[in-house]
Image (cartoon, helix red, strand yellow):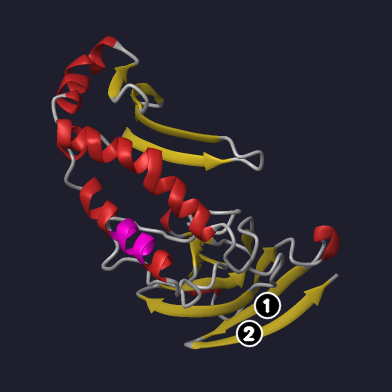
């Protein structure tokens, strides 16, 4: 992320990596983009992957370039929500935050090649990448989301999805309104980046079969893309058999 714009996003569960945006067209920019792709593959094959048998074990690495020119880096491993291990870039060694991390520290410190790659990345490559990308074209400060409704029939019910895309900045609230709605996947939704730097998300609910055609359901999207953050995009949805009728209502 540079200037609150996501340049690259990768999830090991995805089938492919995020495609390179067209505006990254310089030789240096393409090199750093390819390097980020290689870094994701490397991250999946480090000793971290060997010990990360718990879903509560994670790693977070960052580098920061401040307006006054100051530069700072950090690489921290977290276990069960608490500091576990961190990298001292200047001394080229890992620091155990708790006694239980000493064995893992020795494992990482014992790989001199890995330590050299890590320290070189945080000392030079990451900083160079920031300098390459910091003057990239800015995404519009605010962009109104596009809202679409999809439905899928299942035995005894219809699942209705509200897909919201093309908005910026990232913060958004998506809610379904209507009687007897059941959230899908416990109502958890992810906000994911688009290729152009905007974002997308979706939220699904289940409409009981006995309510089909009897009620109006609304997907309400709140976003700051309009001054004073008081615009509500409301999609009124009436489900009649297999037909989904959508109407758009803009409230200001």
Q: Main secondary structure of the magenta part?
A: helix
Which residue: 22% across, 15% down? 102
User: Dot 2: few (<14), some (14–19), or many (≥20) neighbours within 10 Å?
Assistant: some
Q: Crowding near pointer 1: few (<14 within 10 Å), some, many (20+)?
A: some
- The C terminus, quarter of image: bottom right
**Residue at mark 2 to residue at mark 1: CA–CA distance:** 6 Å
Who's the residue at 34% across and 57% down the image? 36
Seen in the picture, residue 241 relative to 10 is either above or below; the reply is below
Q: Position of residue 193 (x, y in %)?
A: 49, 64
x and y percentages locating residue 55 in the rendered image: 29, 37
Bounds of the magenta segment: 31-37
Residue at 53%, 73% in the rendered image: 196
- Left/right placement of residue 87 relative to residue 29 reads left
The earlier-in-sequence mark between 2 and 1 is: 1
Q: Which residue is mark 2?
A: 246
Q: Is residue 107 above or below residue 206?
A: above
Q: Does the stretch in magenta take in 33?
A: yes
Locate residue 83: give its quadrant.
Answer: top left
| Secondary structure found at label 1 | strand
Question: Mark 1 — residue?
Answer: 236
Q: Position of residue 165 (x, y in %)?
A: 56, 72
- 200 vs 169, nearest the viewer: 169
Q: Nearer the viewer, residue 100 or 205?
A: 100
Asked whether disc 2 touches disc 1, contact meaning CB atoms under 8 Å apart, the reply is: yes
Q: Is residue 39 left or right of residue 46?
A: right
What is the secondary structure assignment of the residue under circle 2? strand
- The mark found on residue 29 in the picture is none
Q: Residue furthest top?
A: 99
Q: Residue at x 55, y 62 (%)?
A: 181
């Amino acid at each position: 992320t540079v200037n609150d714009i996501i340049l690259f996003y990768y999830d090991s569960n995805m089938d492919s990596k995020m495609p390179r945006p067209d505006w990254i067209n310089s030789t240096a920019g393409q090199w750093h983009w390819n390097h980020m792709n290689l870094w994701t593959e490397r991250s999946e094959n480090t000793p971290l992957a060997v010990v990360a048998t718990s879903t509560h074990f994670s790693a977070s690495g960052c580098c920061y370039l401040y307006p006054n020119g100051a530069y700072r880096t950090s690489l921290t491993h977290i276990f069960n929500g608490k500091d576990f291990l961190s990298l001292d870039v200047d001394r080229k060694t890992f620091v155990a935050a708790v006694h239980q991390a000493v064995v893992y520290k020795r494992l990482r410190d014992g790989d001199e090649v890995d330590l050299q790659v890590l320290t070189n990345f945080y000392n030079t490559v990451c900083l160079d990448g920031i300098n390459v990308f910091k003057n990239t074209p800015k995404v519009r400060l605010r962009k109104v989301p596009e809202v679409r409704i999809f439905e899928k029939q299942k035995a005894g019910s219809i699942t209705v999805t509200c897909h919201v895309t093309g908005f910026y900045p990232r913060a958004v609230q998506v809610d379904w309104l209507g009687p007897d709605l059941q959230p899908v996947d416990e109502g958890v939704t992810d906000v994911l980046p688009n290729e152009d730097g905007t974002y997308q998300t979706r939220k699904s609910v289940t409409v009981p079969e006995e309510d089909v055609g009897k009620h109006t359901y609304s997907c309400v999207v709140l976003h700051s893309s309009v001054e004073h953050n008081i615009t509500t995009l409301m999609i009124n949805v009436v489900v009649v058999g297999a037909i989904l009728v959508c109407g758009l209502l803009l409230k200001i």
